[in-house]
Amino acid sequence: MDIEVIIERHEQRIKTLERDISAMKEVQTEIRLMNETLVTLANELKHTNEHLARHERKIDEIDSLPKQRMQQIITAVIAALSGGLISTIIGMILV
């Protein structure tokens, strides 16, 4: 009779352990899926950052265009004024 009680207790413990193992397998599967999702998100974030960096470079290029154009205009004005001044001086000398 004692042996039957001991065997029954062992069977109950085995069932409990089997239930726990099944639950752990489910948790393990969920963890694996979460890891895969995190890897996917990390890759997407990397691509998004690269895309953002490209846009920032383009914006910097676009921002620099008016400055370059203004420098060209200033250079042209200085050249025109210098040319006019030199022409006037030469004209005064020749008269």
Image (tube, helix red, strand yellow):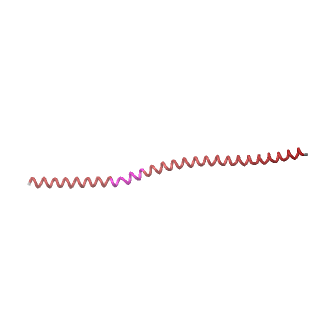
Residue 25, position as x, y percentages in the image: 70, 46
Residue 78, position as x, y percentages in the image: 23, 54
Residue lying at 57% horizontally and 47% vertically, measured from the top left: 40
* 90 or 11, nearer to the observer: 11
* 12 or 83, nearer to the observer: 12
For residue 67, which quarter of the picture?
bottom left
For the N terminus, which image quadrant?
top right
Quick check: is 62 in the magenta stretch? yes
The residue segment tinted magenta is 57-67
Residue lying at 15% horizontally and 53% vertically, measured from the top left: 87
Q: Which residue is farthest left?
A: 95
* 90 or 6, nearer to the observer: 6
Q: Which residue is farthest front?
A: 2
For residue 84, which quarter of the picture?
bottom left
Quick check: is 66 in the magenta stretch? yes
Image mark count: 0
Residue 11, position as x, y percentages in the image: 82, 46
Residue lying at 19% horizontally and 53% vertically, measured from the top left: 83
For the C terminus, which image quadrant?
bottom left
Q: Which residue is farthest right?
A: 1
Left or right, 30 with respect to 76, comes to right
For residue 66, which quarter of the picture?
bottom left
Residue lying at 61% horizontally and 46% vertically, measured from the top left: 36
Magenta part, dominant SS? helix
Residue 14, position as x, y percentages in the image: 79, 45
